[in-house]
Image: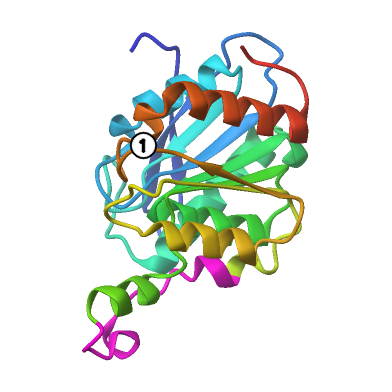
């Protein structure tokens, strides 16, 4: 899409590599840095539309692939996704010298749980959860009410639980039209979050809501980011 970017490789102690892209802001100085935790399907190459939006808002973006995704090594697991996001945070703070209070942790869908876990272990300026579930166990129980899902699932990703211990401002974004993760999950996450917090309602499905609501989406993001971090991007 014509953006300048840097290939980044992070190495875990076991030698496994996590690959990502660092995309500088459109103008310097940047308003802040977005640590982007993507969802379950695809890889960082499928998030260009979102990267462009934050770029237009004059934020740096660091987006990475969990292990087992894209060009990253290994196989994914819940604990590895958490560790990969924390490694990404450490890269921003220690290597790039980003100020923690100027970092926005953004998570979409499954990435929302990863983002919430990361925010609970660090001190970001803002956490944004888009189209996220309260937990995978809650999702499973709704889809398969006749099965003991909590005993059968290998994953938990308890986003709502993580939110209760997060002191930074939180923005929750969800659409009533989401066909994969019910709108009620977004409302429950908002209720679980500590103030200050904000809820943004989209229209459209799970994977295209932010595009179908593009003008409203960008305007709402801009207002939330300006309120919490200052400055304007558009």
Quadrant (top left, top right, bottom left, bottom right) of the N terminus: top left
Provide residue 86's location: percent of width, then percent of height. Answer: 56, 53
Left or right: residue 107 compared with residue 66: right
Magenta residue span: 145-161
**How busy is the neighbourhood of tag 1: few (under 14 within 10 Å), some, or many (20 plus)?**
many
| x, y percent for residue 127 | 62, 47
Residue 150 on the magenta segment: yes
Residue 168 in the image: state x and y as whole percent: 74, 52
Whether residue 117 is situated above or below residue 96 in the rendered picture: below
| Residue 204 inside the magenta-drawn segment | no
Q: Of residues 21 and 175, which is closer to you in this image?
A: 175
| Residue at image point 57% right, 34% down | 34
Q: Is residue 20 above or below residue 157?
A: above
Along the line of sight, the residue nearer the viewer: 189 or 24: 189
Q: Please provide percent x and percent y for residue 186.
A: 49, 57
Quadrant occupied by the C terminus? top right
Q: Secondary structure at mark 1?
A: helix
What residue do we see at 71% from left, 33% from top?
A: 97
Examine the rendered structure and indicate whether residue 160 appears above or below residue 108: below
**Residue under the point 29% across and 50% down:** 73
Using the image, determine if residue 160 lies above or below residue 227: below
Residue 23 shows in this picture = no
Q: Is residue 127 left or right of residue 43?
A: right
Front one among 37 and 184: 184
- The residue indicated by pointer 1 is 209
Residue plotted at (51% across, 51% down)? 85
């Amino acid at each position: 899409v014509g953006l300048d970017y840097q290939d980044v490789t992070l190495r875990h102690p076991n030698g496994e590599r996590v690959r990502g892209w660092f995309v500088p802001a459109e103008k310097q100085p940047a308003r802040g840095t977005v640590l982007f935790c993507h969802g379950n399907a695809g890889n960082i190459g499928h998030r260009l539309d979102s990267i462009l939006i934050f770029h237009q808002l004059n934020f740096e973006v660091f987006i990475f692939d969990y292990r087992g995704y894209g060009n990253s090594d290994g196989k994914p697991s819940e604990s590895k996704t958490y560790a990969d996001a924390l490694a990404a945070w450490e890269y921003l703070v220690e290597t790039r010298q980003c100020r923690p209070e100027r970092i926005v942790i953004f998570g979409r869908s499954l990435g929302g749980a990863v983002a919430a876990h990361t925010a609970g272990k660090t001190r970001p300026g803002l956490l944004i959860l888009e189209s996220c579930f309260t937990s995978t166990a809650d999702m499973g129980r709704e889809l398969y009410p006749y099965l003991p899902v909590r005993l059968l699932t290998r994953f938990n990703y308890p986003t709502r639980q993580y939110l209760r211990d997060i002191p930074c401002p939180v923005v929750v974004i969800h659409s009533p039209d989401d066909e994969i993760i019910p709108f009620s999950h977004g409302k429950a996450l908002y209720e679980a979050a500590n103030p200050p917090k904000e809820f943004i309602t989209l229209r459209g499905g799970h994977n295209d809501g932010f595009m179908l609501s593009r003008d409203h989406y960008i305007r709402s993001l801009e207002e939330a980011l300006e309120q919490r971090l200052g400055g304007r991007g558009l």
